Image: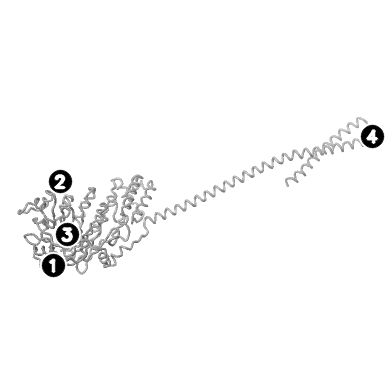
Amino acid sequence: MYKEDKLYVAHSTNGPISIIGKMANRHGLIAGATGTGKTVSLQVLAETFSQAGVPCFMADMKGDLSGISQVGKMNGFIEKRCAEFGIESPQFAECPTRFFDVFGEQGYCMRTTVSAMGPQLLSRLMELNEVQSGVLNVVFRIADDQNLLLIDLKDLRLMLDFVGKNAANFTTSYGNISSASIGAIQRALLAIESEGGDKFFGEPAFDVNDLLDKVNGKGVMNVLAADKLMQNPKLYSTFLLWLLTELYTQLPEVGDLPLPKLIFFFDEAHMLFEGTSKALVDKIEQVIRLIRSKGVGIYFITQSPTDVPVDILGQLGNRIQHALRAFTPKDQKDVRAAAQTFRANPDFKTEDAIMELGTGEALVSFLDEKGAPSIVERAKILFPLSSIGAISDGQRLDVNNMAPSNIKAYDKFFDRESAYEVLNEHYEKARKEAEIAEKEAAEEAEREAEEKEKAKKEKQSGRNKSITRTIFGTMIGAVATSFARSMGTQVARNITKGSTGSRSTSSKKKSSTTLNKAAKSATNAATRKITNEILKGIFK
């Protein structure tokens, strides 16, 4: 209940206990064992902030917080509490509520882009080692320098492929990029996708300013369905850490306000710090320390204060500590540690009180007007004015249908041109150029082969013709010579016969020799002539 700049959330033997409005952004802690009332305390705090006009964000692990969207009603427990606290007629009312879901199943999609999350948070999500984280940083830097947008996981996957294939070209400017690290990151991306984490990346990206809405003067309760998200603790904690980082980055400095602009409840806070590098824990501490000047208060919900690093725990000024159980030496140590975080009350021993608290009871210490922790008091938490427990699917749908258009727009997924499309176009162009070059090379090789075959045939044909000419020339020459010789001999005989009757023996011999020479000459001439005529006929 909100009244006169005070948020009334608990009641002790000394009267109401309230958080002072201007101290609410100094962060807080709700701790206690399972089943001791942490969820109800969270709901009471949230709806009290809502009544004061302060919007809240909270993760709903089991669906129990969805009841904050419905009007509460009187029951025996509340009647008893009213009598104890002196409340005559509680004004039951619902809180204006919007449901969100990373997977888009129980509420409007809440997603971001790969670039907005950044390499540091992605490295944590993928559990990369130092070398692999360094390579991922290089990939992001190359994408920025090449104006390639990294929106979803397929952008990052293809960007990793591009950098891996061209590592030699980037080594001089960006350092060594090992194929082993690229492969390890690719495998981690596949693991995220198999767990549904790919649905967290895309557009439209969530605008954290949409968490700051009010309806009829009441702060809107932004409830994230986290029952499925909790199956991947790394994704859950990294997602909420991203959301905190976005708030810190985007919201303007406002200093100390009478009331915060937003209260951020971080349930299962121990998941944020488990397996987290010191560098990232230091960053978380910085965000928590500085974000209060942006008007944001962060309230961690966990089982034991020891789940939170000491440097961060020291910044959580508003405390609600439910019961802790001490069954082991470690449990006892945790109880002592929790007791030591409170300003002691002389009326009871804090360490003993922590183990004696009943369900709905807590040790409470809020900051006073000067920002100093008040003396711890044993108190009972107020009852919620909204409904306790999960709502039906129909009620959830009715609440979602009342959301404004800017919230409904988150379900209209779109995929604009980014690294995936640009690199695919690059690969397609290179593929086509390679195909053209391969085709041209094949055609050129075919032409060369044809020319060689043609030259070979021509050479063989020329050789065959030469052989044919030689054979035919020899054969025809022999025939022609024989024919001409026969003709010459016949002519010589005829001439000899005509001349032997009138000449002397010596004259006959001379005449015979002369005639033989003439006949031989005639024979040779006839042979050449006949041969040429025959060859002309064959090879014309």
In depth, the one of 459 and 173 nearer the eye is 459
User: Please, what secondary structure does the residue beneath circle 4 have?
Assistant: loop
Residue situated furthest top in the rendering:
506
Residue 168 is left or right of residue 445, and the answer is left
Identify the mark nearer the N-term, 4 or 2. 2
Residue situated furthest left in the rendering:
347
Q: Are marks 4 and 2 in contact (CB under 8 Å)?
A: no
Q: Residue at x 25, y 52 (%)?
A: 233
User: Please, what secondary structure does the residue beneath circle 2 have?
Assistant: helix
Residue at which label 2 appears = 330
Identify the mark nearer the N-term, 1 or 2. 1
How far apart marks 1 and 2 lie (CA) works out to 42 Å
Residue at which label 1 appears = 90
How far apart marks 3 and 4 lie (CA) works out to 163 Å
Q: Nearer the viewer, mark 1 or mark 4?
A: 1
Q: Are marks 2 and 3 in contact (CB under 8 Å)?
A: no
Residue 159 is left or right of residue 475, and the answer is left
Graded by Cα atoms within 10 Å as few (under 14), some (14 to 19) or many (20 or more), the crowding at tag 3 reads: some
Q: Nearer the viewer, mark 3 or mark 4?
A: 3
- Pinpoint residue 136: horizontal percent, then vertical percent: 32, 49
In depth, the one of 390 and 152 nearer the eye is 390
Residue at which label 3 appears = 40
Q: Are marks 1 and 4 in contact (CB under 8 Å)?
A: no
Residue at which label 4 appears = 501
Q: Are marks 1 and 3 in contact (CB under 8 Å)?
A: no
